[in-house]
Image (tube, rainbow, N blue to C red):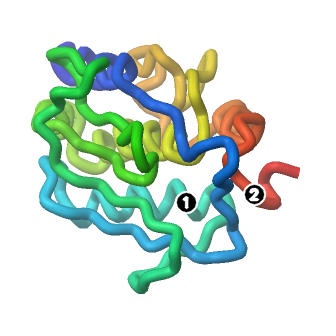
Amino acid sequence: MKSAIAVVVGLLAACGPGQGLNDKWTVRKPVQVIVENQPLDSAEAHRALVEGLHQLGFQTTNTETGQVITAVRDDCTCASCNRNTAAWVDPVSYDVIRVCDRAGVAAQDLGVARAADLILKHELGHALGLRGHTPSGLLSARLDDHADIRSFTQSDITAICDADGLASPVCL
C-alpha cells in the first residue's frame, strides 16, 4: 500500500497545466477518449476518463470531434518526472496523458479501478486547465490522505473552472 501511495503522490510532482489560456475545452462538442498501449487496464482507463469528463458536463464519443483526450504509455523521462511519477500531462499539446509503467504498481496495490480513478482523473484535471493542486480532493497534492476519493469533489471542479480552460455549465 505504501508503494502505491508513493507512486500516486509522486505523480503529482510531474503534473502539468492544461491547454493554453486561449484554448478552452467546451461541452458543446463531445470529447473523443483514446486509450492506447499503457500500463493500466485499457477498459478501466477509458472508464475513468469518461466518468471524469461526464462529471464535468462533457459527452464522449468514439469518433473524431476535434476535442480528444489520449492516454498513452510513456517512459517518464520528462523534466519534472521522478522515480515515483505515475503519469503526467504532455506540456506541448496538453491533451495527452502520459502513463508511466509505475502506474502498474498502484494498480497492483490499490486495484485497477481505484488506481485509474486516482491517476487518470487527477491528470484529466490538469489537461483541462488546472495548473496547481487543490487543498483537498482528487486534485490534492497529497492523495495519500484522500486515497478513497474516486471522483472530482466540488473543490476540484471549482479549481478546474477557475483555471479558465473549461466552458461548461458546471462552471456557472
Check disc 2 and report the residue beneath it: 167
Q: Position of residue 170 (x, y in %)?
A: 78, 54
What SS does tag 2 mark?
Answer: strand
Give amino acid for label 2: Ala
Do the residues under discs 2 and 1 have CB atoms within 8 angstroms? no
Expressed as whole percent of the image width and height from the top left, the position of residue 64 reads: 43, 82
The percent position of residue 142, horizontal first and vertical second, equals 45, 14
Is residue 135 shown left or right of residue 118? right
Q: Nearer the viewer, mark 2 or mark 1?
A: 2
The structure residue drawn at horizontal position 37% and vertical position 63%, both measured from the top left corner, is: 47
Residue at image location 50% in from the left, 45% down from the top: 127
Looking at the image, residue 169 sits to the left or right of residue 86; the answer is right
Along the line of sight, the residue nearer the viewer: 105 or 96 = 96
Q: Which residue is mark 1?
A: 53
Query: Residue 43, relative to residue 90: is it above or below?
Result: below
Q: Is residue 1 visible?
A: no
Q: Is residue 24 above or below residue 54?
A: above
Quadrant of the rendered image containing residue 109:
top left
Q: Position of residue 99 (x, y in %)?
A: 23, 42
The number of numbered discs placed on residues in the rendered structure image is 2
User: Which amino acid is tagged 1?
Assistant: Leu
Name the residue nearer the viewer: 78 or 28.
78
Checking the image for residue 35, the label placed there is none
Quadrant that contains the N terminus: top left
Assess disc 1: are there few (<14), some (14-19) or many (≥20) residues with their C-alpha within 10 Å of its C-alpha: many
Give the residue furthest to the bottom: 63
How far separated are the C-alphas under marks 2 and 1? 12 Å
Q: Nearer the viewer, residue 132 or 19?
A: 19
Pointer 2 local density, CA inside 10 Å: few below 14, some 14–19, many at least 20 = some
